[in-house]
Structures are given as structure tokens and as C-alpha cells.
Image (tube, rainbow, N blue to C red):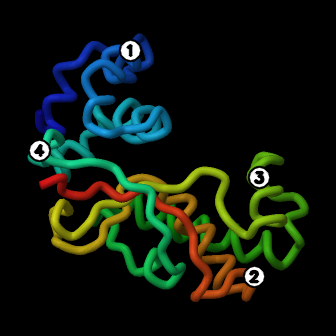
């Protein structure tokens, strides 16, 4: 099954892919509930994602939760689209402001703030692709652009060190 086949799945009135169908067809592909919801359900019908990832053969991949240095994560490529780049830039500013103001007045939910303050990590890891799977043959961030921008801002503000390690879901070849 290729990523583009997600367009054939049933979807709800909001345009999101049916979660039950996803669990039945995607769970065997080593995907957790978090991956199914945040990557497949929310982005499986997204035009930019289909353009970028439509030909990826999901039957030959699996998701791995990996620990990577912050400097590695910040070097991941992103979809070459102004909207994604703008999202990273805006959240970079938000991250700098949050670090400067000790997270007071931030738009983030209380649990997310608590995770950054107490553990210096995100509450939910973003999603990336290994060079063997990614269209540009580089590590690629495919979901979590707001988190990437926020992390970048925390680093630029000196709140997070580039050598710290964070978890990130990585889509890898299963062969």
C-alpha cells in the first residue's frame, strides 16, 4: 500500500480519514495510535503530503521511536512550501519568547509547558523520515513543524542545548 492509497479510505464530515479503517489497515505496518492519528488521519488527505509522499510504499516501512541530538533534528529538511517554512519561523519566535518569559503567557497547553519546563522535551514527539524513505534522500521532518520551530527558538534562546537528545518518530525501511 502506498501513501497515495490513503485517498481511497473513508473519511468523516471534517475530511479526516476514518480512524477505525486506519487502525485496521495501518496497524499491521508497525504504527502506534499516535502515529495513526497525527500522521495518517490528519495528513493522509493533505494535498502537499500526497504530492511529497504519495509514492512511498508503506508496506515496506515501519515507524521507530529514535533518540537524536537536537542539532540533528534541527537539520532535518522540510517540505519546500512557504506555509511550512512560515510555521517554523513563527514558532521559532514563540519559542524564544517562551524561554525569555519563563513560559508565561504562552499559547501552549499547560501539559506542554510542564513537559518543557520539567523535562526539557516535547510532550509528543514529531515525525520524520529516514534518508532511505524520504523523497529528498535526507532526514525529513514530515509532521511537527510547529514543534520544530519552537525547539529552534528554545535553542536560540539558550534554553535547550544542541547536544541534548529528544525522541522523534522515524519512518524507516523495513527490508
- Is label 4 in a helix, a strand or a loop? loop
Left/right of residue 122 with respect to residue 172 in the rendered view: right
Marking on residue 20: 1
Label 1, label 2: how far apart the Cα atoms are: 40 Å
**In this view, the mark in front (2 or 3):** 2
> Tags 3 and 1 in contact by the CB under 8 Å rule?
no
Callout 1 environment at 10 Å: few (<14), some (14 to 19), or many (20+)?
few
Residue 29 in the image: above or below residue 13: below
On the rendered structure, is 134 left or right of 27? left
* Labels 3 and 1: the sequence-earlier one: 1
Please give the name of the residue rendered at 66% of the width and 73% of the height, measured from the top-left corner: 93
Image point (44%, 57%), residue name: 65
Q: Is residue 59 left or right of residue 80?
A: left
Identify the disc placed on residue 57: 4
First in sequence: mark 1 vs mark 2: 1
Query: What is the spatial separation of the Cα atoms under label 4 and label 2, in whole angstroms?
Result: 39 Å
Amino acid at each position: 500500500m502506498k501513501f497515495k492509497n490513503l485517498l481511497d479510505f473513508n473519511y468523516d464530515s471534517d475530511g479526516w480519514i476514518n480512524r477505525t479503517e486506519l487502525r485496521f489497515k495501518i496497524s499491521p505496518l508497525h504504527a502506534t495510535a499516535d502515529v495513526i492519528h497525527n500522521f495518517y488521519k490528519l495528513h493522509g488527505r493533505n494535498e502537499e503530503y500526497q504530492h511529497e509522499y504519495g509514492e512511498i510504499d508503506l508496506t515496506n516501512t515501519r515507524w521507530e521511536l529514535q533518540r537524536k541530538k537536537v542539532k540533528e533534528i534541527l537539520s532535518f529538511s522540510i517540505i519546500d512550501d512557504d506555509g511550512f517554512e512560515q510555521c517554523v519561523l513563527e514558532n521559532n519566535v514563540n519559542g524564544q519568547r517562551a524561554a525569555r518569559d519563563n513560559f508565561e503567557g504562552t499559547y501552549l497547553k499547560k501539559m506542554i509547558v510542564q513537559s518543557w519546563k520539567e523535562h526539557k522535551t516535547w510532550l509528543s514527539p514529531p515525525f520524520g523520515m529516514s534518508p532511505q524513505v524520504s523523497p529528498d534522500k535526507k532526514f525529513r521532518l514530515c509532521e511537527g513543524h510547529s514543534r520544530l520551530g519552537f525547539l529552534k527558538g528554545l535553542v536560540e534562546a539558550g534554553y535547550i542545548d544542541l547536544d541534548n537528545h529528544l525522541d522523534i518518530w522515524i519512518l524507516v525501511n523495513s527490508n
